[in-house]
Amino acid sequence: MILRDALRSLQKDFSKAFFYWLIFVLTTMFIYLFYNIAMSDPSVDPIRNPSSTITYVMILVVILCSVDILFANDFYVKLKGKDLAVRLICGGRFTQIAGFLLAQTMLLLVLAVPLGIILSNCLLPLVNAMMSSVDQSFAVSSHPEAMLNATVILLYVVFWIILLNMSFAYRNAVGLLMNPSSITSASEDSPFGTNLVPKKAKQIFWIAVFLVPILLIYWNRSLAILVSLIGMVGLNGCLSDVVAPWISQQVSGRLMKDPDRMAAAGFARRDLRVLKNNIFLFEAGAIILVSMLVDSIGSMAEGMTIFISYLVMACLQALAMMFKFGTEISGRRRLFLTLNHIGFIQKDQKKIIHQEIFYVYGFVIGVTLLYILNILLAYTLAGDLTAGTSAFLLAGALLPLLICAGLNLLLYRKAVFPKEREARMHAD
């Protein structure tokens, strides 16, 4: 019964299930490929040699993959709130709700793991071709142990998904599940009196913490990871104390003459606050892996592992941002209905959506260019990287953001204008 309901629910919400499944496919492909590369070099043993670079990369990768899957699960489960509420009203227990969600998760996982392994094996010749151009003696082969390790990590993540789903069903009442948009965020006012610090002083401080590390990268490249992470802390401060107040000032000032841009800027202010942690994870993960890649140029196994980690992590972190953004915009329909009531026609509303997506992803791309480009430029000027490699690495971080921006735009329009989709279906 639960299995049949799970299949029916997956078919009904195919687009949401597809992106959730895609995260599983990419995670499986990456972890399996990761272990195959590590196990192909006898000198690399992330289990028995915990001090190796591969071990640190493995820990970082497992943490980031876990976080990404949890963001995808949050996006998938919250959009099923009404379905879960109906089951609770009809007498379903919390354990049955969790079992229903578990059945869907396991079905998607079973469908994703084989494809992820097949794609990983298909990439092995490409990886070997890239390695042979530098070192003819090193080759990556498929290892059965890699499949076991990848499965163990995925099961570990699924275990936490089960706990989170049970917690979600237990904590949320039926009324809240029926109307997810009624969830409110906690106030961000500081309880420790930091508001006593002058606003201008805080803004100058956070801007300095964000920008000064870029200069320090050129001064000492070996400090790139440390100073860049400090810069990301500055970014978080800038989002709260510089960017949000500046947007508020624009909304109440010159943008009042342009209602479309004013509405888009107001939505973008909320989006950046919601996506703050995702932006930090994306930028910090890319910065750490780029810096580690340059430091491991002498080792083929380490270099290729980190190189692939960087490319796949950029994709996964961008998808995680897309899922978080998708969760936020799923409740925007009522706000756009309000805009419709006060005179914004559908053409204006679509313009607002396009501008909002442009503002949010433009900001993220701008920060990525500011930090990743300067790190790569510092290494290129020092002769550690070629210009072509630096351009490829920069594109590896920007392309996933551009693709996810397009996907978020489609999800946004689908959430706000469902009747438009129904009209197209009837027309077909």
Image (cartoon, helix red, strand yellow):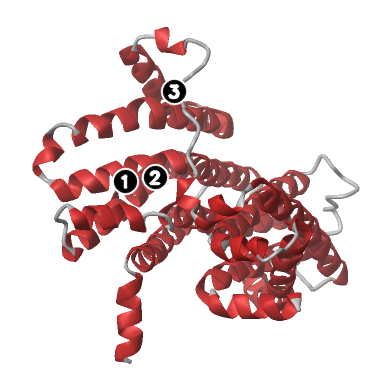
| Disc nearer the start of the sequence (3/2) | 3
Q: Residue at x 44, y 23 (%)?
A: 209
Q: Hey, which residue is sitting farthest bottom in the picture? A: 428
Q: Which disc number belongs to residue 209?
A: 3
- 371 left or right of 6? left
Secondary structure beneath label 1: helix
Q: Nearer the viewer, residue 307 or 133?
A: 307
28 w.r.t. 291: above or below: below
Amino acid tagged 1: Phe
Query: Of all residues shown, which one is farthest toward the top?
Result: 196
Disc 1: which residue: 267
**Whole-percent x and y of residue 256?**
12, 39
Residue 218 appears in the rendering? no
Disc 2 residue crowd, few under 14, some 14–19, many 20+, Cα 10 Å: some
Q: Residue furthest right?
A: 48
Image location of residue 257, percent across then percent down: 8, 41
Q: Position of residue 58 (x, y in %)?
A: 74, 50
Q: For marks 1 and 2, give the CA distance.
A: 6 Å
Query: Which residue lies under the disc numbered 2?
Result: 271
Please state if 79 lies on the left or on the right of 5 as rendered. left
Let me know if residue 102 appears in the view.
yes
Could you say whether the residue bearing mark 2 is in a helix, strand or loop?
Answer: helix
Numbered label attached to residue 317:
none
Q: Which quadrant: the N terminus?
A: bottom right
**Residue farthest to the front?**
90
- Callout 3, which amino acid? Val
Q: Amino acid at mark 2?
A: Asp
Q: CA distance from mark 1 to mark 3?
A: 27 Å
Contact, CB < 8 Å: mark 1 with mark 2? yes
